[in-house]
Amino acid sequence: MAASHNKETEKQRWDRNFADLLQELRVAQTGVQILFAFLLTLPFSNGFPKATEFQKDVYIVALISAAFATAMIISPVAFHRALFRQGRKPELVRYAHRMASGGLGFMLVSMVSSVLLITDYVLDWKWAVPLTVITGLWFLSLWAILPFAHRNWGEDEEDAEATESADRDS
């Protein structure tokens, strides 16, 4: 797979990067929209008036961070519309990358806040805090720590393939 990327032009690379990013945004967009919709309906449920002030504060954090995540994850569409056919794909890809990353950050805050809200409502505080911390650490592990720790995974394989190829050629 790496060999095919070596022969692509810079324009082809930007097009591929943009297509990859769009696929990622489609997945994230669906998730954040479902969460946002759930949070928008929550105050109208029968049990919401029983929520404590703390739970209502946590709800506001979850709602606003879901709204910010939604805006950031959808914003590359508006940016693309504004730059359509102007040959500015590199700028669009860089912008979309930043917005997707920021959107994921807000989505993490919203999801963890939602877990705190629900676990505090359903369970006791002594269970809500550890479950929320575990959830936050799980998200951070999968969305930040593992990806950054393994950014160069493919490089070792590419180096090995290049070495094997060079050995066969000689």
Image (cartoon, grey):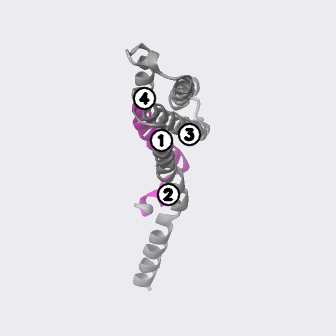
Q: Determine if residue 84 is in view.
A: no
Marks 2 and 1, how far apart at CA:
19 Å
What amino acid is labelled 2 in the image?
Leu
User: Considering depth in this image, is 122 or 115 the residue closer to the camera?
Assistant: 122
User: Considering depth in this image, is 91 or 8 the residue closer to the camera?
Assistant: 91
Q: Nearer the viewer, mark 1 or mark 3?
A: 3
What amino acid is labelled 4 in the image?
Leu
User: Considering depth in this image, is 47 or 23 the residue closer to the camera?
Assistant: 47
Query: Does label 3 or label 2 sit earlier along the sequence?
Result: 3
Q: Farthest residue toward the bottom?
A: 170
Marks 2 and 4, how far apart at CA:
24 Å
Query: Does label 2 or label 1 sit earlier along the sequence?
Result: 1
Q: Residues within 10 Å of mark 2 (few under 14, many from 20)?
A: few
Image quadrant in which the C terminus is located: bottom left
Marks 1 and 4, how far apart at CA:
21 Å
Q: Nearer the viewer, mark 1 or mark 4?
A: 4
Query: Does label 2 or label 4 sit earlier along the sequence?
Result: 4
Residue 105's mark? 3
Q: Secondary structure at mark 1?
A: helix
Q: At 39% from the left edge and 27% from the top edge, which residue is drawn?
A: 34
Looking at the image, residue 52 lies above or below residue 112: above
